[in-house]
Image (spheres, grey):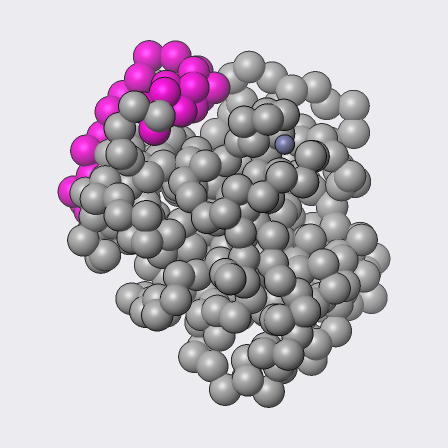
C-alpha cells in the first residue's frame, strides 16, 4: 500500500495515485493524503538532520515515487534574522526566508515543480507543461531540460518579453495565448485531458502543491524545530500558502499565517487571514 494517495477534500473519496486534480464525483479539488501512522514511525528529526542540504532531506514527508533520485539540490534556503526591519515593524523577532537563492531558477516555484516532475516521470509523461506568467515557466523549462522532458509553456500573449527570457534559454516551446490568464488555464485543462501531457499546475497539481510544504519544514528546522507565531507569505498564485498545513500533526498548523498581496491582485479566500482586506478578485491581475 502506498504511503500517500489522492483524496477528495470534500467527499473524501480515494483516487489512488494518478494525474488528476478534481474529484469526478463532486468536482472538488484532490489533495495528497498520507498514512501518518506509518510516517511517524519512519521519519525522525535525527534522520532529517542527516539528509542532504536541500528540500530532499524531507523526502519521507513528500509524495515521491519509490526509488526517486533527485537531480538538483533544490531548497533549504537561508533563514536569517532581520532586526532592523523588525524594529521598523514593531516585531520582537523577525526572520526572512530567502527563496531568491533557491535552485535552479532562484524561485520558490522550483520546489513545487521538483515534486510535480518526480510524479510526471512516474506517470510516464514525456512532455511537461504549465500555464504561467513568469517564474513557473522558467522553473518548468529548466527542470524539464535537466530531467530529459520536452516542455511546452502557455503564456498570455501580452506577457512582457523579459519575463520569459529564462524559459526560452532552456529550450521550451512557448505558446502565446490571446486572452486572460484564466482563459490560458482553461485551455491547458483541455489540452491535459486530450494529450498525455503532465501539466504541473493542472493534472499534477495535488503533488505540485505538496512541494510548498518544504518551506514550512525548513523554517521549523532552522528555528530548532519551533514554529513562528506568524508567517507572512506573498500570495501570487496561492501555491505557497498551502505550506501552512504542513503535515496534519507532523508539524503543528501555522495558525498565524497570513497572505499578503499587492494591490489589485486577486485575493484568495479560505481560512487564511489576509492583508487584502476588502479587495475584490479582478479579471486581469497585475504581474510582478
Ligand atoms: Zn469528491
Tally of numbered tags: 0
Question: How would you classify the magenta stretch by its main secondary structure?
Answer: helix
* Residue found at the very far front of the displayed protein: 1
Q: State yes or no: residue 177 in magenta.
A: yes
Can residue 109 be seen here? The reply is no
Horizontal and vertical percent position of residue 3: 54, 63
Task: Tell me: 201 left or right of 229.
Answer: left
Residue drawn at x 62%, y 62% as measured from the top left: 35
Q: State yes or no: residue 224 in magenta.
A: no
Can residue 190 be seen here? The reply is yes
Vertical order, 75 against 285 (above or below): below
Residue drawn at x 69%, y 80% as measured from the top left: 224
Residue drawn at x 83%, y 57% as measured from the top left: 90
Horizontal and vertical percent position of residue 62: 51, 62
Vertical order, 129 against 256 (above or below): above
- Which residue is nearer to you in this view: 166 or 245? 245
- Which residue is nearer to you in this view: 81 or 8? 8
- Which residue is nearer to you in this view: 267 or 192? 192
Looking at the rendering, the stretch of residues picked out in magenta corresponds to 165-192
Residue drawn at x 35%, y 70% as measured from the top left: 67
Horizontal and vertical percent position of residue 285: 54, 22
Indicate the quadrant of ligand 1 in the picture: top right
Horizontal and vertical percent position of residue 73: 37, 69
Task: Tell me: 156 left or right of 288.
Answer: left
Task: Tell me: 259 left or right of 152.
Answer: right
Amino acid at each position: 500500500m502506498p504511503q500517500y494517495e489522492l483524496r477528495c477534500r470534500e467527499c473524501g473519496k480515494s483516487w489512488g495515485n494518478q494525474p488528476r486534480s478534481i474529484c469526478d464525483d463532486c468536482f472538488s479539488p484532490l489533495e495528497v493524503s498520507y498514512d501518518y501512522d506509518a510516517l511517524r514511525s519512519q521519519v525522525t528529526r535525527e534522520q532529517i538532520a542527516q539528509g542532504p542540504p536541500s528540500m530532499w532531506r524531507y523526502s519521507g514527508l513528500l509524495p515521491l515515487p519509490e526509488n526517486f533520485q533527485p537531480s538538483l539540490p533544490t531548497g533549504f534556503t537561508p533563514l536569517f534574522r532581520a532586526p532592523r526591519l523588525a524594529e521598523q515593524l514593531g516585531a520582537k523577532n523577525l526572520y526572512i526566508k530567502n527563496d531568491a537563492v533557491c535552485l535552479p531558477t532562484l524561485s520558490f516555484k522550483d520546489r513545487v515543480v521538483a515534486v510535480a516532475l518526480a510524479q510526471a516521470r512516474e506517470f510516464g509523461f514525456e512532455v511537461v507543461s504549465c500555464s504561467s506568467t513568469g517564474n513557473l515557466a522558467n522553473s518548468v523549462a529548466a527542470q524539464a531540460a535537466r530531467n530529459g522532458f520536452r516542455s511546452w509553456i502557455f503564456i498570455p500573449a501580452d506577457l512582457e518579453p523579459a519575463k520569459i527570457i529564462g524559459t526560452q534559454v532552456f529550450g521550451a516551446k512557448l505558446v502565446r495565448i490571446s486572452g486572460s490568464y484564466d482563459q490560458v488555464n482553461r485551455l491547458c485543462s483541455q489540452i491535459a485531458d486530450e494529450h498525455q501531457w503532465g501539466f504541473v499546475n493542472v493534472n499534477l497539481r495535488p503533488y505540485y502543491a505538496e512541494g510548498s510544504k518544504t518551506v514550512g519544514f525548513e523554517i521549523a528546522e532552522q528555528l530548532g524545530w519551533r514554529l513562528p507565531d506568524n508567517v507572512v507569505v506573498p500570495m501570487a498564485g496561492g501555491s505557497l500558502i498551502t505550506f501552512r498545513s504542513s503535515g496534519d500533526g507532523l508539524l503543528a498548523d501555522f495558525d498565524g499565517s497570513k497572505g499578503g498581496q499587492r494591490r489589485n491582485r486577486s485575493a484568495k479566500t479560505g481560512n487564511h487571514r489576509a492583508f487584502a482586506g476588502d479587495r475584490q478578485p479582478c479579471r486581469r491581475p497585475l504581474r510582478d
